[in-house]
């Protein structure tokens, strides 16, 4: 579900590509990649969000993640 964003699609895609390149460079398997990305999310929330807002932000992130995951049975 597309969301309006203050960030351009180009900027988002550039960051995504760079992050994927780092994971590929290190030949990180899916489970390691998810662990690293999860740790990054936790670190960002814990260091950039006021304590009173952390649970709400984590819940919002979780809902967005659930909404964006495809139920495609290809894998």
Image (tube, rainbow, N blue to C red):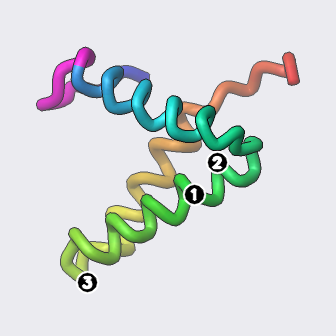
Is mark 1 in CB contact (under 8 Å) with mark 2? yes
x%, y% of residue 58?
A: 42, 64
Q: Is disc 2 surrounded by few (<14), some (14 to 19) or many (20+) residues within 10 Å?
A: some
Task: In this rendered view, identify the residue nearer to me: 17 or 25.
Answer: 25
Kindly give the residue lying farthest to the bottom in the view shown.
51
x%, y% of residue 46?
A: 33, 76
Residue 72's tag is none
Task: Locate the C terminus and report the quarter of the image it occupies.
Answer: top right
Kindly give the residue lying farthest to the front in the view shown.
25
The magenta stretch is 3-10
x%, y% of residue 45?
A: 33, 68
> Which secondary structure, mark 2?
helix
As displayed, is residue 19 above or below residue 60?
above
> Which secondary structure, mark 3?
helix
Instruction: Give the residue at mark 1.
Output: 36
Instruction: Give the residue at mark 3.
Output: 51
Instruction: Give the residue at mark 2.
Output: 33
Asked whether, in this view, residue 21 is left or right of residue 55, the answer is right
Q: Is 25 in the magenta?
A: no
Asked whether, in this view, residue 13 is left or right of residue 10, the answer is right
Kindly give the residue lying farthest to the left in the view shown.
6
Of the residues under marks 1 and 3, which one precedes in the sequence? 1
Name the image quarter holding residue 12: top left
Say which residue appears at 74% left-offset and 26% top-offset. 71
Alpha carbon of mark 1 to alpha carbon of mark 3: how far? 22 Å
């Amino acid at each position: 579900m597309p969301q309006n964003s203050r960030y351009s699609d180009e900027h988002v895609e550039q960051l995504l590509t760079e992050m994927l390149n780092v994971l590929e460079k290190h030949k990180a398997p899916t489970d390691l990649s998810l662990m690293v990305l999860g740790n990054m999310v936790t670190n960002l929330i814990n260091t950039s969000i006021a304590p009173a807002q952390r649970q709400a932000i984590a819940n919002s992130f979780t809902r967005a993640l659930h909404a964006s995951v495809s139920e495609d049975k290809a894998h």
